[in-house]
Amino acid sequence: MTDLLEVRNVSMFFGGLAALSDVSFGLRKGEILGLIGPNGAGKTTMFNVVNGFYHPSRGEVFFKGGKISGLRPHQVCKRGIGRTFQVVKPLQRMSALDNVIASAFLRVKGKGRAEEIAAETMRFVGLYDDRNVISKGLPLGKRKKLEIARALATQPELLLLDESFAGLNSAELDESIGIIQKIKARGITIMIIEHHMKVIMSISDRIVVLNYGEKIAEGSPLEIAHNPLVVEAYLGEEQSA
Ligand SMILES: Nc1ncnc2c1ncn2[C@@H]1O[C@H](COP(=O)(O)OP(=O)(O)OP(=O)(O)O)[C@@H](O)[C@H]1O
Ligand SMILES: [Mg+2]
């Protein structure tokens, strides 16, 4: 079966630093792939390569069989890849709903249709009651949901989530896990970067581990939890924390 996304031998250099070194992996339609590893391992850089912010120094990225590395971010988004950002940056002075309407316009032309999609998306993530709040005034947990809503409103087939759970309290965590599961149930494929091991282990179908820009492991959550390389590079420290 052809992969929905294929990352093939990708390297990304910043000056002398190899943020990614010859990384390859695939993503099957409908699955949730966790991307984990210590700080600075190259996770966000991988998202930036996949969504077209960076063009890889070496290697290629394919989506639905077509090459996307080399395209610009809005072109990648139009092909069907939506993303959130580790540092939330919705347009601060717009209302939450207007932010999501602005995203919806990437795919639809009419204002009415964009408003419909935005309203539906706000209900889906549980933000509808906050739709008229200026984005800047939302607490972190809701800004994280707004980020997800903005990405969803572009109607992606693949959604990239960069630490959408960071800083959430445990009730918000549970709620966000529920949202991710609902997104998956809609048939949307998900790649997720997350440091919360309980979250990543419970929702991922498969996990890829990066360390210093290299892929050191790939497998089921159970395989990853017991992989000595991963425990040494990353999990040991997390589990004792
Ligand atoms: N635009 C850039 N210019 C120079 N160096 C960069 C750039 N972007 C990332 N890096 C470096 O590449 C490495 C990987 O960074 P990246 O942000 O991908 O890590 P990460 O795995 O997302 O870490 P974290 O868990 O802390 O978010 C780091 O050493 C970082 O300093
Ligand atoms: Mg990061």
Image (spheres, rainbow, N blue to C red):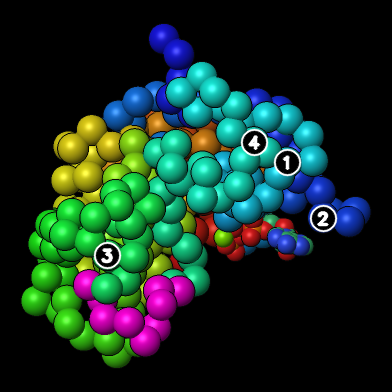
Instruction: From the top left corner, tell me how far across and down residue 21 is, in percent.
Output: 76, 39
Q: Residue at x 34, y 47 (%)?
A: 107
The residue carrying pointer 1 sits among few (fewer than 14), some (14 to 19) or many (20 or more) residues within 10 Å by Cα, namely: many
**Residue depicted at 34% across the width and 65% down the height:** 102
User: Earlier along the polypeptide chain: callout 2 or callout 3?
Assistant: 2
- What's the CA distance linking mark 4 and mark 3? 27 Å
Between 228 and 132, the one lying in front of the other is 132
Residue on which disc 4 sits: 69
Mark 1 and mark 4 in contact (Cβ < 8 Å)? yes
Left or right: residue 218 compared with residue 155? right
Quadrant where the image shows the N terminus: top left
Where residue 37 appears, as percent x and y from the top left, is 57, 50
Seen at 49% across and 65% down, the residue is 86
* Furthest residue in direction top, as rendered: 1
Name the residue carrying label 3.
101
Dot 4 or dot 1: first in sequence order is 1
Task: Name the residue rendered at 62%, 40% in the picture.
Answer: 71
Q: Identify the magenta region.
A: 89-97
Q: Mark 2 or mark 3, which is nearer to you?
A: 3
Q: Which mark is residue 14?
A: 2
Can you tell me whether the CB of the residue at mark 2 lies under 8 Å from the nearest atom of ligand 1?
yes
Q: Looking at numbered disc 3 in the image, what kind of residue is underneath it? A: Ile
Q: CA distance from mark 2 to mark 4?
A: 17 Å
Looking at the rendering, the quadrant in which ligand 2 lies is bottom right
